[in-house]
Image: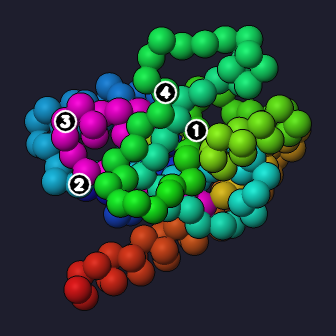
Amino acid sequence: MIICAGNNETFSFATPIGVGLIETAMNLTRLCLFDKPEFLLFVGTAGSYGQQKIFDIVESKTAANIELAFLNNDAYTPLENVISTNTTDTKDLIVNSSNYISTNEELTKKFLKFGIGIENMEYFSVLAIAKEFDIPAGGVFCVTNYTNKDAHDDFLKNHADAKILLEEHVKKRIKELTAK
């Protein structure tokens, strides 16, 4: 099953599941309870912490839920905050999720030290639900912006093109997989 966030981030080939961590968790749980998919592929856009460039396509099976306060040792969590469905020895670029869009460029560069390269609001919930239901899962992202003061404006400016690139990439990958 191919899924996406929803609202203005929809694709003709994907089922919308909601925006942010909470809507995603509720709606994806409901989907899995009533018709458990064999595989979940999340498709969406992302902000870069600095290394990935605008319109880069990133595939990952690892997500984190690390808040900015953690980066300055101003917070901790007793909860699991990194989830991976990666069963290979290859190292994934980690996708961070929060209900907030980061705009502090200097602070977010600290994520890079942890192998976290991009942020997407929904992905941690997707992998958490996939893990709970024992469903293999992954994500494909297109970078629309950097995590800086212009994040929202750049997202709006680049969103339509990023959706086109994502659609082309996913269709190409499906074609490759079905040819095997």
- Drawn side of residue 79 relative to residue 134, left or right: right
Q: How is the image coloured?
A: rainbow
- Labels 4 and 1: the sequence-earlier one: 4
Q: Residue at x 43, y 23 (%)?
A: 80
Task: Name the amino acid type tagged 4.
Answer: Asn
Q: Work out whether residue 130 can be spotted.
A: yes
Tag 4 and tag 3, C-beta contact below 8 Å: no
Which x, y percent locates residue 71?
73, 25
Residue closest to the far bottom: 179
The label on residue 87 is none
Q: Quadrant of residue 116?
A: top right
Q: Which residue is mark 2?
A: 39
Q: Which quarter of the rendered picture does the C terminus lie within?
A: bottom left
Tag 4 and tag 1, C-beta contact below 8 Å: no
Q: Which residue is mark 4?
A: 81
Alpha carbon of mark 3 to alpha carbon of mark 2: how far?
11 Å
The label on residue 96 is 1
Circle 2: element type: loop
Task: Name the amino acid type tagged 2.
Answer: Phe
